[in-house]
Image: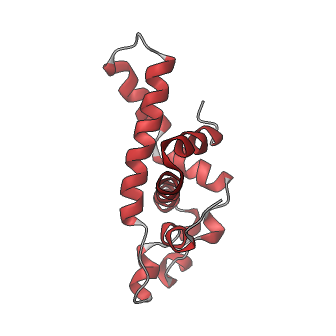
Amino acid sequence: MFRDAGLLEQALTHSSFANEHPGARDNGGLAFLGDAVLALVVGEHLWRAFPDEPEGVLTPMRAELVSGANLCRWAVAIGLGPVLHLGRGEEQTGGREKESLLATALEAVLAVVYLEGGLDAARRAVASLALW
């Protein structure tokens, strides 16, 4: 599914690992992009599903869908925890199960999906997470 193994590797690399391995790139920038892609895809879906609802109703709906808890749950469901690259400290403190770490990794992977396949691929990926 992924064409650029290096980009996927980056998406799965936590900053703790990158700090311990010179030259490794962490997933922070990709998570930033993935967060925006996720917000767009979810926002678009909600706007289409509830065309008569005002922004004040749609915004909290989107926030709930893209919450850290939900992102973590979906990251666990697709098996991201075991494939993450973590530094020693994160490994020792249960980083593979930390909500924020898993949510960030999922956002980074969604960014790679978007970069490699465009918005339609991102829409399919988000829909496959059973958001709606």
Residue at 42% across, 31% down = 43
Furthest residue in direction top, as rendered:
52
Residue at 45% across, 43% down = 38
Total number of numbered labels? 0
Quarter placement of the C terminus: top right
Quarter placement of the N terminus: bottom right
Q: Residue 125: image x %, image y %?
A: 59, 45
Residue at 46% across, 56% down = 115
Q: Nearer the viewer, residue 111 or 19?
A: 111
Q: Nearer the viewer, residue 99 or 131?
A: 131
Residue at 55% across, 69% down = 4
- Identify the colour scheme used: secondary structure
**Vertical side of 97 occupied by 42: above or below:** above
Q: Residue 20: image x %, image y %?
A: 43, 88
> Residue 59 sits in which quadrant?
top left
> Residue 18 sits in which quadrant?
bottom left
**Vertical side of 31 occupied by 50: above or below:** above
Q: Residue 72: image x %, image y %?
A: 55, 52
**Vertical side of 12 occupied by 122: above or below:** above
Q: Residue 131: image x %, image y %?
A: 59, 35
